[in-house]
Amino acid sequence: MTPVPAPLTIRTPAFLLDQVVVTCLVVPPVLGLGVEFGTIVSPGEPRQLVFVALMAVAFAYHFLAEWLTGRTLGKELFNLRVLADDGSALGLRGSFLRNALRLIDGLGYWSVAVFVILLRGDGKRIGDVVGRTLVVQSD
C-alpha cells in the first residue's frame, strides 16, 4: 500500500510545537548564562549567535528524533510519522537529507516549504524530495 501524506492542517501544529521545544532547549540556557532577553531579540551579534544555536539544535532535534523513532514530540502528539517513500522506516540518510534542507524549506517563515508542498500536491517539501521521505498519519 502506498503511504498517504499527512495534511498541512495537522503537520502545521505539530511543527509549531516542535518549534516551541527547540526554543525551550536554547533560550532558557542562554538566559541562564546572564544574557538579557532584550539582547537576544534585538539586532546584533547576540541575536545572530542565538539564531545559529536555534538552527543547530533544530537540526539535531529533528534529525535524531526522526532517525531513531520516526517522529518528534510534535509529530508524536499529532499522530504523525516520517517514513521513507516506500513506507519503510526512515533511515539515517533520509533523515539527514530531509533535515539538512530545513535551511531552504524554512525560508520566508516556512513559506518555501508550504509553497512546494502545495505546488507538488504530494505532501513533500524540498527536504522530503531529496531525502525520499514522507510525513504520514500513524495508524
Image (spheres, rainbow, N blue to C red):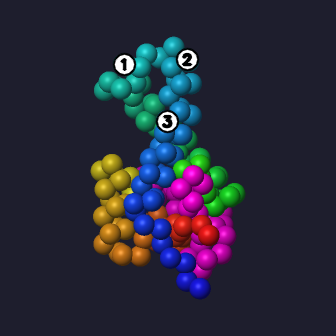
Q: Quadrant of residue 111?
A: bottom left
Question: Which amino acid, mark 1?
Answer: Gly
- Of labels 1 and 2, earlier in sequence is 2
Q: Residue at x 49, y 39 (%)?
A: 20
- Crowding around mark 3 (Cα neighbors within 10 Å: few <14, some 14 to 19, many 20+) is some
CA separation in Å, label 1 and label 2: 14 Å
Q: Quadrant of the N terminus?
A: bottom right
Upstream in the sequence, badge 3 or badge 1?
3
Image position, residue 49 (x, y; %):
45, 31
Q: In the rendered image, which residue does mark 1 sit on? A: 38
**Residue 47 drawn above or below residue 52:** above
Residue 43 % position (x, y): 31, 26
Residue that mark 2 sits on: 33
The range drawn in magenta is 75-103
The residue sitting at 32% across, 24% down in the picture is 42
Report the amino acid beneath label 3.
Thr
Which numbered disc covers residue 23?
A: 3
Q: Position of residue 63 (x, y in %)?
A: 59, 54
Q: Quadrant of residue 39?
A: top left
Q: CA distance from mark 3 to mark 1?
A: 16 Å
Look at 56% across and 34% down and name the residue there: 25
For marks 3 and 2, the one nearer the N-term is 3
Which of the 4 image quarters holds residue 57? top right
Q: Within 10 angstroms of label 2, few (less than 14), some, or many (20 or more) residues?
A: few
| Tag 1–tag 2 contact (CB < 8 Å) | no
Q: Above or below — where is 24 with respect to 89?
A: above
- The residue drawn where x is 55% and y is 83% is 2
Could you tell me residue 128's position as x and y percent? 48, 67
